[in-house]
Image: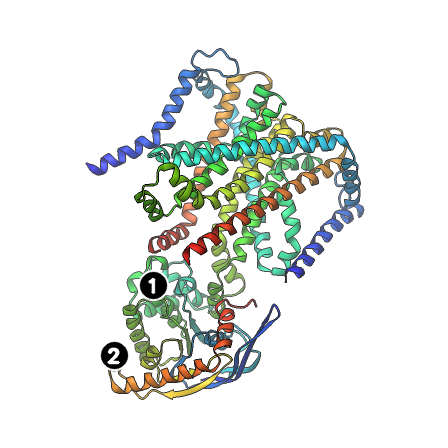
Amino acid sequence: MRGANALLGACGLAAFLALGEAVPRLGLVDEEYFPPTSRIADALAGELSDDAFWTALGDTLTGWAIGLVIAVSAGIVAGVLISVTPYLREATASTIEFLRPIPSVALIPLAVLLYGTELRSVLLLVVYASFWQVLVQVMYGVQDVDPVAEETARSYGLGTWARVRHVLWPTALPYVMTGVRLAAAVALILAVTAELVIGAPGLGARIAVAQTSQAVPEMYALVVVTGLLGLLINVGARTVERRALAWHQSVRGEVAV
Amino acid sequence: MKGLERVLLRLLLVVALPALLVVAWWYASDGSTDIYWPPLRTILSTFPDVWTGERLREDVLPSVLRLSAGYACAAVAGVALGTVIGSYRGVRAVCEPVLEFLRAVPPPVLVPVIMLFAGIGDTMKVVVIASGCVWPILLNTVEGVRAVDSVMSETARSYGITGVARLRHLVLPAASPQIFAGLRQALSIGIILMVISEMFAASNGLGFTIVQFQRGFAIPDMWTGILLLGLLGFVLSVVFRFVERRALGWYHGARDASRRSS
Amino acid sequence: MLDVRGLKKVYEGSGRRVEAVRDLTFTVDAGELVCLVGPSGCGKTTLLKCVGGLLTPTAGEVLIGGRRVTGPPPDMAVVFQEYGRSLFPWMRVRENVELPLKQKKLTAARRRELVADALASVGLMDAAGAYPWQLSGGMQQRVAIARALAYEPRVLLMDEPFAAVDAQTRADLEDLVRGLWRQRGITILFVTHDIDEAVYLGERVLILSSSPTVVQEQLKVDLPADRDQLHTRVAPRFAELRTHVYEQIQAAKRGTPVADRLVKDLTDTPPPQ
């Protein structure tokens, strides 16, 4: 069944690529705007043999990774602190509800003024956007802690830190993983956006250059690269998440038996 | 008396921190001479001058209209396509890798691509917003439609509820919690794309105006723009939550009921 | 009214081939209440789905009123065990009962009449405006029964309908079904794994063997038509009948205990269609 699905999927992908080749060749759309698949593939090959491309890819990944690490650590620490400190959760709820939906792109002009095209511009946007994803999931996770388990731990005289370590963290972990997965995707979007709009070095800036210099196939090739990067991040994050969840459930299963 | 106290306490908890933060900002920035961090007093007093009258009509309104148009197109297309793809296992298997790829493309890189086709007018912005928002809606719809409960499905079949009626009374309502999850994700992507598409190429709109302020070093004006965008994001999310609560009242009710009993 | 002839159902998937139902033949007369009872995992649900037109049998046929069943027949209603998943949570009780009637293209006035009548006969007139999840399990199953009644079926299939409710509610619901059956003269095929319930409710009890399933025995229940929880269940004849059924099922279980478990895996999770 799985093999058949993979085959169908491959057929779909092939059809998609063939369509991308045929539509401009048949003159249904202007080739200048929509180069056929083969020309995009040529441009992609050209990019792959260009050192500047690899530098740009490295820049994008650096911004993504540093931003993600900061956001995840800050999100986890803040989430746990807010959840375990009495009244802090209630006191911060309205503030979080207000700050979270603020679009991170609103910070673009500020980032430009403060940091110009430096990495810090990218980080500002990436961290702001992905921090909330992690924070909110951590808080959901802590909320999910079984009160009985919590009371049991309390009655055995476990201190705050021990309770966080042995009760709260294991329960919250699956939620944290979900938060990390969401944050990873959002971080890539914002990293590329910052490069594209602000001009910080990276794939986004390279797309902007390709656009202004009318290098249409190269632009498409770079868009494909960002898509593949996103795909890789999604698949990777999902695999990590599934592992963590499987571990989690198996442990719970053993406890239940 | 006890109840009143509790209400007051809750009110205090809701407003205390925001008030504290605003006050802290107010005093920390008061008398600030750093041109990037103007006093909050200045920002707030600039706000009405900047965002009333003409700007409201010529910048804010077009932005919001473009966002609504793009979002609405994405919602219709996403739900329609998602229902088709989710209903047929074969279609799903064929489309899945392509959809996974298209979803993974960071939506802002669509701006330069779509500019090639649609120029720099309103059409471009609406298309950009729609093509960025459509993926979370579509993929969530696929998941929702796929996961329709087998017993409900058999019930419908045994009572002869098929075709359009099945779609209307079973499939779409059953998938609606997932569809709303997709719509919510799409909303934040839509706002991002609204701003970005205007920063790239526009002659009006929120994103355009804010960048103009920044380039012209009209810093307090720029700050008001940031505040306004924040406010817009907040208001839209409140509206969304309100609509969601109404449309999915049954879902939240049923979930609470099953939580209480377990 | 209901004819099952040589019914056979084999599930095939992922290299395994499991014969859930081997060869079933029985009839249910018009206006009869027949209970099907068998060891757990004996393919009761498979059988019911074949009769309801939800599964296509591998061999044999099902006839209702002389017509062969190829899909869900319009004059048949099914009450499932999982009431929580069978009622639509986004519809109020009234709408849930009314939906199949809309599909039958009845006029609004007629629909209202049928809905009111069905809800009244299960004692849920007041709950018409509630959502199913606001009701208790027993009440939800009443709604499902009302929906079936409003549909005006000639044949009513009930798939372990009371397996998930508590004992008291269960007794009430059993009396409700028996009462409705006597009032309305519907043909009912009632599947259960509870021997007492089968004997208490049925005019006839069909005892199924372990999987691969055949009819082990058909037993006429010669209890008086007026039954009640208090007296019927302590009547000597009741005890004899239930002992007999119990022994038959024990014998059936001893038959092929290994195959039993194998099939349970498959029938509990409905096979992909």
Mark 1 and mark 2 in contact? Answer it, CB < 8 Å: no
Q: Amino acid at mark 1?
A: Gly
Q: Is residue B55 left or right of residue A205?
A: left
Which SS class for mark 1? helix
Q: Tell me the tag on residue C181.
A: none
In this rendered view, identify the residue nearer to me: A53 or C63: A53
Which SS class for mark 2? loop
Q: From the top left corner, tell me how far across and down residue A181 is, in percent.
A: 55, 42
Residue at image location 54% in from the left, 68% down from the top: C271
Q: Is residue C259 left or right of residue A171?
A: right
In this rendered view, identify the residue nearer to me: A186 or C157: A186
Q: Amino acid at mark 2?
A: Asp
Residue B97 appears in view: yes
Residues at discs 1 and 2 both on one chain: yes
Q: CA distance from mark 1 to mark 2?
A: 22 Å
Report in which chain the residue with disc 1 lies. Answer: C
Q: From the top left corner, tell me how far across and down residue A68 is, in percent.
A: 56, 34
The residue tagged 1 is C137
Q: Quadrant of the C terminus of chain A?
A: bottom left
The residue tagged 2 is C228
Vertical comparison of C144 with A13: above or below: below
